[in-house]
Each structure stands twice: as structure tokens, then as C-alpha cells.
Image (tube, rainbow, N blue to C red):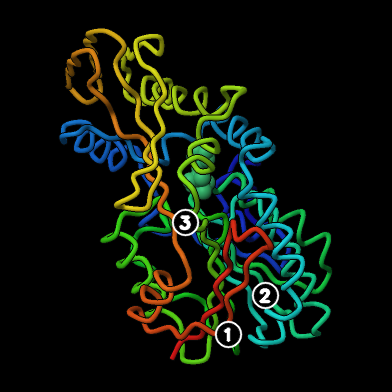
Amino acid sequence: MTEKHPALDLLKPAEESESPRFQIEVRSSASTRERDLEELGNCLRASPPWIPAKFFYDARGSELFEAITELPEYYQTRTEELLLLGVADQVAARSEATELLELGSGAARKTRTLLDAMSRSGLLQRYVPIDVDPVVTRRVAAELLAEYPALEIHAIITDILAPLVALPQGHHRLVIFLGGTIGNLNDDACERFLDGIGEVINTGDHFLLGVDRIKSKARLEAAYNDSAGITADFNLNILEVVNAFAHGDFDQNGFEHVSIYNEAKHRIEMWLRARSPQRVALADLDLELSFETGDSILTEISTKYDKGLIQAKLDHAGFELEDWHTDEESLFGLALARRR
Ligand code: AVJ
């Protein structure tokens, strides 16, 4: 036997040293610094300039988003959680799924509700979290392996917006995309995303999609302009993330948070509006930007749907809507669709 320096263990693929029930696959479509820099540069040079929503989520951004989910004005998270508790057994029964594939799995808060329902149905075999963040994904996988002693986990690290190729095969699969995150995609990106899911799953597989519903402008704007100012902090924090990422000098105090509901496009738009003329340099992008008072950067869209709108989109991607679940106040919707 050859002697091996202990440091070499660090170079071993992690899956070899972990549970036989766990594997993790890092795909070439996973985000890289070079790709993210190029994308950011292109977005900031566009008019109007915009910043991809993924730049919200550094440690502070994730904390602020957690705080948003607990705000009285922000009904989405708690409404979807309750809704899911009420329908999980039905979803498990309808789909007869043995595999749960979750897009943008993150902290997997709502995942357990479905895993529990699938274990009650006696069919659960494998969980496939698909996410950009390897650190969070590994941590959550370790927790789930301990909580579900028979569960296998096959994690995939990728940009979930990149075309999904070759998902692990399974007998009956249930793909879930929760949180209303689909609302962040514009029409084209949404169509490409849904088509992509339609292409990688098989006839009879199911797809559960959470969408925030169209409602009054007042209610929607309150949800994105909370009185405690947390959403404003969340929005402004994106400038700090960009500064850190690209060695920039955006001044948070030079901008203000604006959220408006665009009724024609049935979407919330979050902007950062210059309070006074601003000059910004981003060293790693070799970019200088100037803003007049009132010039704005688009930081997020959050499109709202109703049953007909989402049914049409799903139909176009090869899915048939089987069930449409909503809460008493018609705030949020869960669409269960079956691949034709
Ligand atoms: C996590 C994308 C669903 O659009 O409501 C919350 C993010 N932005 N408040 C949303 C968000 C401002 C959220 N999503």
C-alpha cells in the first residue's frame, strides 16, 4: 500500500466519503465567476439597466428575504405553506411519485411536507434537489438523510435556468417549483423554462408549480413596500452584493427603493431610483455608469398569474393541468400538471 498524504483526501470527490445514499453532481452549467461577470456587465449596459435577481442572495440578502417571508404584508410564503399542507397527500396520490425533484431547492422548507406525504403513500425512494448553491444543498441533504432513513438523495448543482439535461430517471416523478419564483422570469424566459422541463420528463410525470395570483394593486404594492422597510433594505442590498462581486462603488444612499405593480404586464417591478446624479465605477467589469436623478435600475420582476394564464403556459409546454389549488382568499395558486 502506498502512503498517502492526508491532505489528498480533500481532493477526493466528496461523494466517496459520504453516505452511500447520497450523491452530488456538479454540472458544467453551474455558475462561474467569469460567466456571472459577463452576464452582469451585459445587464448593466442595457437600457434600462438591470441586475439579475440572483445577486440579491448573499448572506445578508438571504437573511432579509427570510425576514420578508414573516412580514404581515407578505402573504406568499405562509399561504403557500398552508396550502401545501392541505394538498400534499392528494398530490402524492395523484402523481404516485417515487421521486421528488425540486428546482431551486434551497433550504427545502416546504420539501418536507411533500416528502412526508410521499412516505405516507409508501412510494418515496429518492429526492433530487437541483440548486445553484452547493453549500446549502449539502447541508440540507445531510439533514434529510438523517430524518428519512430510507431516502436516497441525488443532488444536482446547476443554474436552474440553464437547459436541464438528463435528470435521473425514475418510475413516476414529481417535479416541484415552489415559492412563486417562476414570477421572476419574463415571458420568454418562462416559456423556455417550462419547455425545458417538459422536454426532460416523461409522459405521466407530474409537475407542481407555485404561483402568486393576480390581485389588487394596493395589496400587491403593500407586499413589496412593507411598512418596516425590509423590502427596501433587501432591494438596496443588491448594490452591496454587486460592489463586492465586481469591485464597484455604488452608493446605497444614492438610490431609493421603488416597487410598482404594472397592471398591463400583471407584474410587480422593483427598481432602484437615483436620488441625485450618480457616477459608479465597476473595476472588474471595466465599466463606468452615470445616472441622472430619477434614472432607475430594474432589480426584479414578479409576475402574477391566474388559473387561465398558467394553464395556457403549461399547455404550451406539453402539460395538462390536473388540479388547481388555491386558498380561501385567492392569494396564491398551486398548479398540478401532468406531462402529456
Ligand atoms: C422569492 C422571487 C418569489 O418575487 O415575491 C420578495 C422575492 N422580492 N420581496 C417575490 C421577493 C421582494 C420573491 N420570490
Residue under pointer 3: 214
Can you say which quadrant of the picture contains the C terminus?
Answer: bottom left
| Mark closer to the chain start, 1 or 2 | 2
| Mark 1 Cα-neighbour bin, 10 Å: few <14, some 14–19, many ≥20 | some
Measured as percent of width and height from the top left, residue 115 is found at 74, 70
* Disc sitting over residue 40 in the figure: none
Residue found 41% across the figure and 35% down from its top: 55
The kind of residue tagged 3 is Ile
Q: Nearer the viewer, residue 243 or 220?
A: 220
| Mark 2 Cα-neighbour bin, 10 Å: few <14, some 14–19, many ≥20 | many
| Mark closer to the chain start, 2 or 3 | 2
Q: Nearer the viewer, residue 53 or 297?
A: 297
- Rendered view: 97 above or below 108: below
Residue under pointer 2: 126
- Rendered view: 143 above or below 48: below
Mark 1 beta carbon near ligand 1 (under 8 Å) = no
Can you say which quadrant of the picture contains the N terminus?
Answer: bottom right
Residue under pointer 1: 170
The kind of residue tagged 2 is Arg
Disc 1 versus disc 3: nearer the observer: 3
Residue found 44% across the figure and 55% down from its top: 304
Distance from disc 1 to disc 3, alpha carbons, whole Å, reads: 35 Å
Q: Secondary structure at mark 1?
A: loop
Q: Are marks 1 and 2 in contact (CB under 8 Å)?
A: yes
Quadrant hosting residue 154:
bottom right
The kind of residue tagged 1 is Gly
| Mark 3 Cα-neighbour bin, 10 Å: few <14, some 14–19, many ≥20 | many
Distance from disc 1 to disc 2, alpha carbons, whole Å, reads: 9 Å
| Mark closer to the chain start, 1 or 3 | 1
Q: Secondary structure at mark 2?
A: strand
